[in-house]
Amino acid sequence: MAYKALKAARGARGGRDTARMMAKMGVKMDELPDVTQVIIRTSNNKDIVIDAPSVTMVTVQGQAMYQIAGGEVSESQPQTVSSSNAPLEVDVQLVAQQTGKSVDESRKALTEAGGDLARAILILKGQQN
């Protein structure tokens, strides 16, 4: 009986000591409130979806790490954000302005670059050489 009480007392003190030691080492833990869903997108075209998780951000020497616990896990295919492959008009205008090319040439380069502005500009600038 005395052993259990002693062990419980050590556990409580150990928690405070651990918190002090973590603070001394620059480790900070914060639970992120109101997280409803976490999506992990893998390179093999699969999404791991965690609904109603508990997410804690652990910061060590300026490096943030996220710990995800609990929640209901499912897997799915990623959903596309846009069904149209046509570049936005504002992007077309920006590429045309940056390269001095026509709007049509800029639109074609943006489509070829998959909407990547920098790549489209490089495609068109490469044509000038």
Image: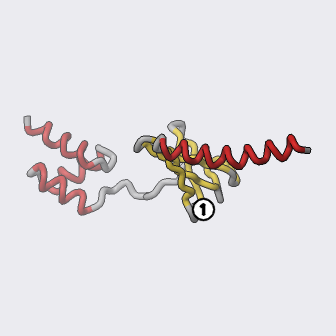
Q: Residue at x 40, y 58 (%)?
A: 84
Residue 106 percent across, percent down from the top left:
19, 51
Q: Is residue 76 visible?
A: no
Which of these two is toward me, 107 or 41? 41
Tell me the element at label 1. Answer: loop
Residue 85 percent across, percent down from the top left:
37, 54
Which residue in the rendered view is the most extreme toward the top? 129
Q: Residue at x 33, y 56 (%)?
A: 86
Which residue in the rendered view is the most extreme toward the right? 1
| Label 1 Cα neighbours within 10 Å, binned few <14 / some 14-19 / many ≥20 | few
Compared to 52, does 24 lie above or below? above
Name the amino acid type tagged 1. Answer: Thr
Q: Is residue 19 visible?
A: yes
Q: Residue at x 46, y 44 (%)?
A: 26
The way the protein has been coloured in the rendering is: secondary structure
Mark 1, residue position: 36
Q: Is residue 39 left or right of residue 126?
A: right
Residue 15 percent across, percent down from the top left:
66, 47
Q: Residue at x 18, y 53 (%)?
A: 95
Q: Name the quarter where the C terminus is drawn.
A: top left
Residue 105 percent across, percent down from the top left:
18, 50
